[in-house]
Image (tube, rainbow, N blue to C red):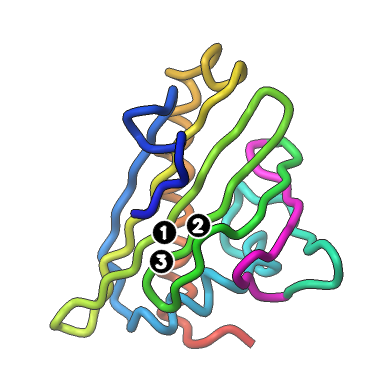
Amino acid sequence: MRWPEGMEPEQAVVHARNELIIAAPRERIWRWLCRAERWPEWYSNCGWVRFRDGGGPDLAAGAEFVWKTFGVRIKSRVLTFAPPGELGWDARAFGLHAYHGWELQALPDGNTRVVTAETQRGALSSFGRWYLRRGLLREHQNWLEGLARMAASGDPA
C-alpha cells in the first residue's frame, strides 16, 4: 500500500488492517468501491457522502468529498487512484488525521483479495487508540462484507 509520508503504519498512533477474498472480478469490486454515493446502501457505518465542487458519483484522482462515518463528519480527498488495483484517501476532522487505503489483487481462480487498511494520527486517535482500533477492525470487516454482497449482485447502476 502506498502510504502518504507520515501516515505509514510505523508512524501512526492507530493502524487497522482487514482482508477478505471476494468471489468477483476486481474490476466489478472497483466499480462498487468507487461509487461512493452508494456506500450508505451497503455500509451501515456510512451516514452519507457528498462530493465537493460538482464531483461524483464516483471517486476519481483528487476528488474531494465530505461524509459521515463513526458519527463524525469527515473531509476527504482521494490521494491514490490506480484502477483497478489501489485506492486511498485522507480523512480529516477535529483531532484526527487519517489515511484509508484499499488494494485489490486478482487471483488466478477469478476471485479478488481485497485489503483495506487505515492509519490515524492526532489527539483524538491518541486519546482513544484502543477503542478506535477495535471499532475500525469491526466496521472495516463490515465494509468488506458489504462490498462482497454488492459485487455478487452485479455492477452498480
Secondary element under disc 3, as helix, strand or loop, is strand
The amino acid at mark 3 is Glu
In magenta, the rendered stretch is 57-70
Name the foreground residue: 86 vs 36.
86
C-alpha separation, residue under disc 3 versus residue under disc 1: 6 Å
- Residue drawn 59% across the image and 47% down it: 90
Reply above or below: 21 against 10: below
Identify the residue shown where x is 57% and y is 71%: 34
Q: CA distance from mark 2 to mark 3?
A: 7 Å
The residue that label 3 is drawn on is: 86
Q: Residue furthest right?
A: 53
Name the amino acid, label 1: Trp
Queried whether the magenta region covers residue 62, the answer comes back as: yes
- Residue at label 2? 88
Secondary element type, mark 2: strand
Residue underneath mark 1: 102
The residue lying at 76 percent from left, 40 percent from top is 73
Magenta highlight on residue 65: yes
Q: Residue at x 15, y 83 (%)?
A: 109
Do callouts 2 and 1 mark residues in contact (Cβ within 8 Å)? yes
The residue type indicated by label 2 comes to Gly
Q: Give percent across and percent down for residue 99.
A: 51, 44
Q: Residue furthest top?
A: 127
- C-beta proximity under 8 Å, tags 3 and 1: yes
Q: Earlier in the sequence, mark 3 or mark 1?
A: 3
Q: Nearer the viewer, residue 95 or 24?
A: 95
The quadrant the N terminus occupies is bottom left
